[in-house]
């Protein structure tokens, strides 16, 4: 009786023991076998790669080319040097041109006329030469202006000066007059119509309006270049005079010979 009561319990226990237990399901967090490219499938890296591969994504900067960069810097440096040199050269040229315009050159009367004919705008100069004897006069008795002629023995230039002349100023001696060359007017030509000594100067294209008469040393003072020009002109005049005398003597010799032949006959 008791055995028959335990039989169902034994069958139930046996059934439970022999029924296979289902294997537990794999957890989502279980470790899986890594694949060769598993490290590239990280969500952040995959998202970044997806953005880089997108059609509208900006291109990543490439590695800098050191040679190209060096050439670019060298070209930029050369352009900088060229611009600096050009600006410096332009500045120097401008300064020299301005300085040259401010320079006052010593000129002989021959050089002064040639310069005035070439470029009348460059009128300022220092005229050096000899005061022509008999040329000092007052154009008007009521004015303090004085006129005289400066010569280099070849060319004469009329000078008008208003003011007191230095004590060393003498006719026939050297003089340096600073002033401006101006075109000769008809009124100036008429003022000295009766003075033959200044006729040659009045026939010129210009006259000198003097602002200062330089006689600072003595009556022999004269700039070197002006003195050399006067000496050359003096020698040329002497040579021309000797040539003229020789030509005249050559012309007289046949005449004297012919006269002697007539006398002998």
Image (spheres, rainbow, N blue to C red):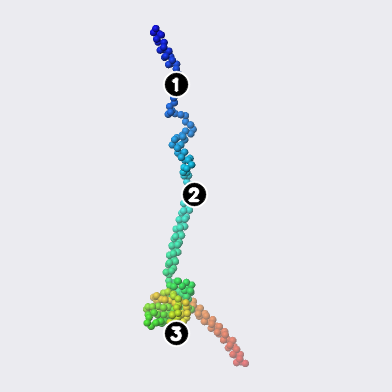
Q: Residue furthest right?
A: 265
Determine the CA span between mark 3 and mark 1: 154 Å
In this figure, which residue is indicated by the disc labeled 2? 68
* Image quadrant where one finds the C terminus: bottom right
In this rendering, the answer to whether 38 lies above or below 59 is: above
Classed neighbour count for the residue bearing mark 1: other residues with Cα under 10 Å, few (<14), some (14–19), many (≥20): few
Name which residue lies at 39% across and 79% down: 145
Relative depth, front residue between 75 and 37: 37
Question: Of tags 2 and 3, which is closer to the observer?
Answer: 3
Q: How many numbered marks, from 0 up?
A: 3
Label pair 2/3, CB-CB below 8 angstroms: no
Classed neighbour count for the residue bearing mark 3: other residues with Cα under 10 Å, few (<14), some (14–19), many (≥20): few
In this rendering, the answer to whether 86 lies above or below 131 is: above
Name which residue lies at 49% across and 77% down: 233
First of labels 3, 1 by sequence position: 1
Question: Of tags 3 and 1, which is closer to the observer?
Answer: 1
Classed neighbour count for the residue bearing mark 2: other residues with Cα under 10 Å, few (<14), some (14–19), many (≥20): few
Determine the CA span between mark 1 and mark 2: 71 Å
Relative depth, front residue between 66 and 169: 66
Kind of element beneath mark 1: loop
x, y percent for residue 44 = 43, 36
Determine the CA span between mark 2 and mark 3: 86 Å
Kind of element beneath mark 2: helix
Question: Of tags 1 and 2, which is closer to the observer?
Answer: 1
Q: Using the image, tell me which numbered label, if any, was put on residue 22.
A: 1
In this figure, which residue is indicated by the disc labeled 3? 194
Whether residue 202 appears in this view of the structure is yes
Label pair 3/1, CB-CB below 8 angstroms: no
First of labels 2, 3 by sequence position: 2
First of labels 1, 2 by sequence position: 1
């Amino acid at each position: 009786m008791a055995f028959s009561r335990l039989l169902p319990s034994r069958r139930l226990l046996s059934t439970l023991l022999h029924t296979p237990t289902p294997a537990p399901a794999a957890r989502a967090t279980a470790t899986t076998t890594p694949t060769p490219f598993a490290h590239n499938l990280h969500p952040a890296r995959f998202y970044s790669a997806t953005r880089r591969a997108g059609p509208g994504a900006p291109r990543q900067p490439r590695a800098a080319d050191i040679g190209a960069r060096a050439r670019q810097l060298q070209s930029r440096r050369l352009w900088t040097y060229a611009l600096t040199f050009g600006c410096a050269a332009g500045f120097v040229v401008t300064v020299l041109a301005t300085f040259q315009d401010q320079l006052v050159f010593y000129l002989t009367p021959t050089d002064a006329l040639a310069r005035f004919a070439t470029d009348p705008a460059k009128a300022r100069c220092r005229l050096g030469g000899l005061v022509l004897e008999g040329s000092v006069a007052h154009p008007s008795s009521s004015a303090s202006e004085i006129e005289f002629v400066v010569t280099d023995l070849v060319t004469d230039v009329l000078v008008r000066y208003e003011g007191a002349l230095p004590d060393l100023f003498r006719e026939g001696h050297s003089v340096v007059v600073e002033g401006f060359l101006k075109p000769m007017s008809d009124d100036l030509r008429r003022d000295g119509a009766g003075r033959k000594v200044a006729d040659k100067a009045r026939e010129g294209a210009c006259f000198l309006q003097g602002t200062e008469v330089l006689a600072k040393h003595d009556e022999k003072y004269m700039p070197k270049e002006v003195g050399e020009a006067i000496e050359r002109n003096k020698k040329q005049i002497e040579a021309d005079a000797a040539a003229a005398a020789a030509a005249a003597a050559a012309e007289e010799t046949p005449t004297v010979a012919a006269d002697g032949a007539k006398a002998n006959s």
